[in-house]
Amino acid sequence: MSRLALLLFALGSLLLTGCGTRSSSSVQPGTGVTPNPPAIRQAVKTAASVVITENDITDRPYQSLGDISVTVSKWTIFDADPTQAKVAEALKEKAAEMGADAVILTRYGTVGIGAFSWGKMEGKGRAVVFKQ
């Protein structure tokens, strides 16, 4: 009987350690920003091509696609804690889905425990597309 209990414990532990962090996101137009017509939006890009910065970009003209926010969560005690790098990657993925060239004015929250997670971190920024 003890071997069966040990086997079930090992199997349960293996399943829990395989869980990864998850993220959610939302997009809202910025204050005073008019949504872009679909013709201005570019094709979907890769997250690797999206530039992310905590500052504004002043050397190139751009148009805002909207403010975005993401939450990266740690669902089990065995998952790695959310980091700014994971939040930045989630922001870049969301911006790439929108066809953005960059995420500017990026802000990161602190790691905290959520009601349904062992830890979470939020990030916000503004998705922009460079003008030609």
Image (cartoon, rainbow, N blue to C red):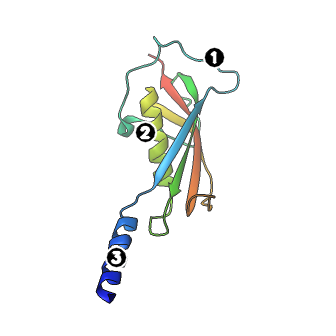
Dot 3 surroundings within 10 Å: few (below 14), some, or many (20 or more)? few
Whether residue 100 is visible, yes or no, is: no
Dot 2 surroundings within 10 Å: few (below 14), some, or many (20 or more)? many
Q: Amino acid at mark 2?
A: Glu
Looking at the image, residue 56 sits to the left or right of residue 42; the answer is right
At x 44%, y 65%, the residue is 79
Using the numbered discs, state the Cα–Cα distance from disc 2 to disc 3 in whole angstroms.
Answer: 37 Å
Specify the label residue 93 is tagged with: 2
* Quadrant of the rendered image containing residue 58: top right
Above/below status of 42 relative to 2: above
Using the numbered discs, state the Cα–Cα distance from disc 2 to disc 1 in whole angstroms.
Answer: 23 Å
* Quadrant of the rendered image containing residue 63: top right
Q: Which residue is mark 1?
A: 34
Helix or strand or loop: what does disc 2 sit on?
A: helix
Q: Which residue is mark 3?
A: 8
Q: Nearer the viewer, residue 67 or 2?
A: 2
Above/below status of 60 relative to 116: above
Q: Earlier in the sequence, mark 3 or mark 1?
A: 3
Q: Quadrant of the C terminus?
A: top left
Q: Nearer the viewer, residue 15 or 55?
A: 15
Q: Amino acid at mark 1?
A: Thr
Q: Nearer the viewer, residue 128 or 23?
A: 23
Above/below status of 7 relative to 16: below
| Viewer-side label of 2, 3 | 3
- Percent across and percent down for residue 51 are 45, 37
